[in-house]
Amino acid sequence: MNGYFDHNATTPLHPAAREAWLRASEKHWHNPSSLYRDAGIASQQLESARERLGTLLGAEAERIVFTSGATESNNALMASFERVAISAIEHPSVRMARKALELPVNANGVVEPEAVKQMIEAKRPALVSVMAANNESGALQPWREIAAICREHDVLFHTDAAQWLGKLDAANLGECDFITGSAHKLGGTKGCGFLVLPAEDSRLNFMRGGPQEGGRRAGTENYPAVEAMVTALEAITPRLDEVERVQTQLRDDFITAIRARFENLRVISESASRLWNTVLMVMPAQQNLKWLTALSRRGFSISTGSACSSGKEGSSVVVSALGASAEELRRVVRISGGWETMAEDWLALAAAFGDAFEELSRGGRPQ
């Protein structure tokens, strides 16, 4: 049984990524910025990975800057603009990086393109930032429509694609001016990610020192991690249509099974188009940390919301944006499966919720 249901926090290393990382670390461990032959080969391999990532994203390779992950990329981007509009459900690395104008979400936790248009016309932000897919609810945001509105009004647009990548096709993301992503969300290693910039944008120069990454981000390039990230995305992409078809049904079967046990269960963004792997629920009873602990004892790993804010009680950004009470926020749990999660894994989790409830009803005393 695979009891890991926290893929939106981080994913296991994809076998193809592991092989790529080991191969790159063994053969091309040299500093790509050095001048001798082996360093030159490492530099060529790095640029090849940049080209391949650009192909996957539908973006020119010269627009891509490799970073330590989406958090660094988002922070650097937010620090480069004075007037920014962001959605009410953005990741903390966007939301906490700069005081910003806030775009509301509808009852499904989705940003309405018309609201973006009205914000632009009324407030004239220099940058609009709306994530591609929400990390908590899985709700897909209309980023292509929003990007088009921003182009019409000569406003730059950014999408945090950390949750979209590795789950849905990324080929059209290059339509956005700025894209950010993290390797460990899609089967790569931690400490690696990227920022895609407009082709001629000279605004960002966010880590000073050496001339790496076109002078935008100093520091020795982590080619093995980059190679692992790109290889993982290449390995996953051809499977995505089939994975989405199968896993969406398994996710919905899980909801049916757990709702049969908990009639008053609330699934956030249930009516919206969502990631095939994600279920954000407000449980009818018991605090989320108690659910997490009881399920962990049964071999299941779930979350109370965003891993980047899970240290805060009642930390769900999405449920809070939808007007939930503090008491409801303490009952939020997030389930996020993976590419290889099986039907029996989903149904075993639903059964474990029932067993955990019996335990918690006895005061948290396992039998």
Image (tube, grey):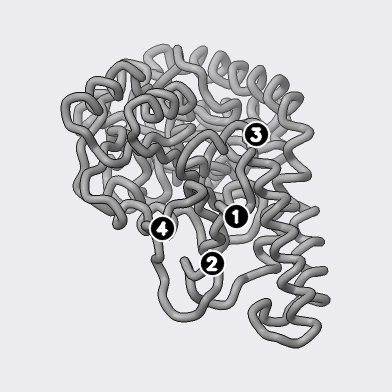
Residue at x 76%, y 24% (from the top left corner): 242
Residue located beneath label 4 in the image: 202
Find residue 214 and name its label. 2
Closer to the camera, 23 or 145?
145
Local secondary structure at mark 3: loop
Number of residues whose C-alpha sits closer than 10 Å to that of mark 3, classed few (under 14), some (14–19) or many (20 or more)? some
Q: Are marks 4 and 1 in contact (CB under 8 Å)?
A: no
Mark 4 or mark 1: name the one nearer the start of the chain. 1
Could you tell me how far apart the alpha carbons at marks 3 and 1 are, in whole angstroms? 16 Å
Mark 3 or mark 4: name the one nearer the start of the chain. 3
Instruction: Please state which amino acid type lies under the numbered disc 2.
Output: Gly
Residue at x 62%, y 47% (from the top left corner): 60
Q: Are marks 3 and 2 in contact (CB under 8 Å)?
A: no
Q: Are marks 1 and 2 in contact (CB under 8 Å)?
A: yes
Could you tell me how far apart the alpha carbons at marks 3 and 4 are, in whole angstroms? 25 Å
Residue located beneath label 3 in the image: 171
Local secondary structure at mark 1: helix
Find residue 80 and name its label. none
Find residue 62 and name its label. 1
Instruction: Please state which amino acid type lies under the numbered disc 3.
Output: Ala
**Which residue lies most toward the left here?**
122
Could you tell me how far apart the alpha carbons at marks 3 and 2 are, in whole angstroms? 24 Å
Mark 1 or mark 2: name the one nearer the start of the chain. 1
Mark 3 or mark 1: name the one nearer the start of the chain. 1
Number of residues whose C-alpha sits closer than 10 Å to that of mark 4, classed few (under 14), some (14–19) or many (20 or more)? few
Q: Position of residue 186 (x, y in %)?
A: 63, 46
Q: Does residue 86 appear left or right of residue 249 in this picture?
A: left
Mark 3 or mark 2: name the one nearer the start of the chain. 3
